Image (cartoon, rainbow, N blue to C red):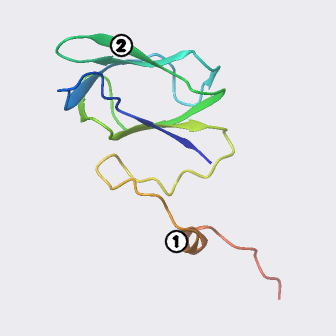
Amino acid sequence: MATEVVMPKLGLTMETGTIGAWLVATGAAVVKGQPLLEIITDKVTMEVEAQTDGHLLKTFYAEGEEVAVSQLIGLFGTPEEYISAYGEAETDPTPITSAELSETTPGPNPTM
């Protein structure tokens, strides 16, 4: 299952942060602890590190865009993972139920 990368809350009063730079290209392999992106706030610039080994599967915001705290900004995992169920950043990134997934996941192709 893909791991969600969300905009971290870097201070008590922080409500938004700006994507300063993506330090890894989409699809690139990353090791645990390697910086993924740079977040800029009014008080600090900080790097967000990978929490595990894997690949940056998708980004939802470009460099320079302002993003609300806890908003989904990227997906991290293995290249084989099914991530098309995640919409663009404006959509609600609520977890998908198994019933919803079975409706969108192609089933076996019956032979006649």
Residue under the image location 28 percent in, 50 percent down: 90
Residue under the image location 55 percent in, 69 percent down: 104
Residue under the image location 52 percent in, 71 percent down: 100
Query: Which mark identifies residue 100?
Result: 1
The residue at which mark 2 appears reads as 46
Foreground: disc 2 or disc 1: 2
**Which residue is most to the right?**
112
- Identify which residue, 105 or 45, lies in the foreground: 45
Residue 110, given in percent of the width and then of the height, sits at 78, 82
Which secondary structure lies at badge 1?
helix
Quarter of the C terminus within the rendering:
bottom right
**Which residue is most to the front?**
12
Residue 64, given in percent of the width and then of the height, sits at 25, 22
| Res. 72 image quadrant | top left
Residue 81, given in percent of the width and then of the height, sits at 65, 47
Tell me the distance, in whole angstroms, between the alpha carbons under discs 2 and 1: 36 Å
- Whether the residues at callouts 2 and 1 have beta carbons within 8 Å, the answer is no
| Res. 62 image quadrant | top left
Residue 74, given in percent of the width and then of the height, sits at 44, 36
Q: Residues within 10 Å of mark 2 (few under 14, many from 20)?
A: some
Q: Please count the marks in the image.
A: 2
Establish if 42 lies above or below 61.
Answer: above
- Identify which residue, 48 or 73, lies in the foreground: 48
Establish if 71 lies above or below 86.
Answer: above
**Which residue is most to the bottom?**
112
Horizontal placement of 89 versus 56: left or right? left
Query: Which mark identifies residue 90?
Result: none
Establish if 54 lies above or below 2.
Answer: above
Residue under the image location 82 percent in, 83 percent down: 111
Q: Amino acid at mark 2?
A: Met
Q: Which of the marked residues, 2 or 1, is nearer the chain's N terminus?
A: 2
Q: Amino acid at mark 1?
A: Glu
